[in-house]
Amino acid sequence: MLYALFHTSVSEYLLFKGGTSLSKGWDIINRFSEDIDLVLSRDYFLNVKKLSCANCTSNTQIHNLREKGQDFLFGEFKDELEAKLAELRLNVTVLSDNDILDENGEPRKVPHDKDPSVLYVQYSSIYNSQAAYAIPTVKIEISILSMSEPYEMRRISSLIEQTYVGEDVDSDLVQTIRTVSPTRTFLEKAFLLNEEFQKEKPRTRRMTRHFYDLEKLMNTPYADLAINDAALYHEIVEHRRKFYHVGYVDYDKDLPDSITILPKEVLLPQYETDYKEMQNSFIYGASLEFGELMERLRVLQARFRSIEFGDKD
């Protein structure tokens, strides 16, 4: 799927990010992913589409770019991706968020200014699995508002190619693509949890992957780099405040003295159920027991709160 995506006409403006990039690009986590997270740089809309709203100097411009970006991704780009996958002889169906049916059998229409935009690639599985986490659909989330840096060029290959090293299996699909740095992913995942926990009813379904990813990241040098990089830390917080602002979030709580990445105790049973489902069908390496994972996050939260940046200016 990544091969097809990075062989479309927008490839030079795409970046690979999120949890999937931690496994495919950086070999930090050992789990499958429910989605592929991508950034389509605003430069594409400035340089290719010549859209002045991509300057994003006002809330009106940001709103207009959200709408025009969704129109492009659900129309022109979706058609191109479908053609590219057919060219690769893959018998799949590509749907947009607006094509998915609701409980009444009607297409659900997502808000026109929703970002990221989501495409679904449905395929026929050779396995008859009823696992809650494993469904025969690749979810592709593409943000047109996300930051584009920091990133590095990383070699991406399939698990099959990695398993049969030197045997020329899947080697024609290996590619080197722009991949967001784990330092940024580490901070973004922490902020995502902190902002989620400000909701009256935080999500619990499919959320423990972020716990797992953060625990894996905290064992790497990237966590130290992120925690000690005041400029990057504040840049990400301010970017989220400007481009992804939602009313229930106090973005100042992303700052070290207030950040919360541990869920409330009342929600722990639901998170534990979700985590066990992920362990059963998504994690293909060793993983901590849920209680151990929570204790590790407790250590990480204390680590965040011990940060002393001083004046960000």
Image (spheres, helix red, strand yellow):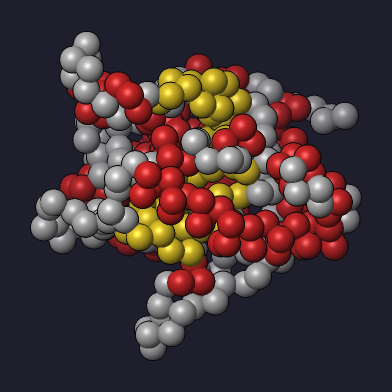
Q: Most extreme residue toward the front, as rendered? A: 87
- In the image, residue 77 sits, relative to residue 18, either above or below, namely below
The quadrant where residue 244 appears: bottom right
Which residue is found at the position 75% from the left and 57% from the top?
65
Residue 276 can be seen, yes or no: no
Which residue is found at the position 44% from the left and 51% from the top?
83
Which residue is found at the position 77% from the left and 62% from the top?
63
Q: Nearer the viewer, residue 303 or 121?
A: 121
Q: Nearer the viewer, residue 282 or 49?
A: 49
**Residue 109: x percent and y percent?**
54, 76
**Residue 134: x percent and y percent?**
24, 53
**Residue 205: x percent and y percent?**
37, 61
**Residue 137: x percent and y percent?**
32, 56
Drawn side of residue 24 relative to residue 116, left or right:
left
Which residue is found at the position 74% from the left and 43% from the top?
48
Quadrant placement of the C terminus: top right
Residue 40 can be seen, yes or no: yes
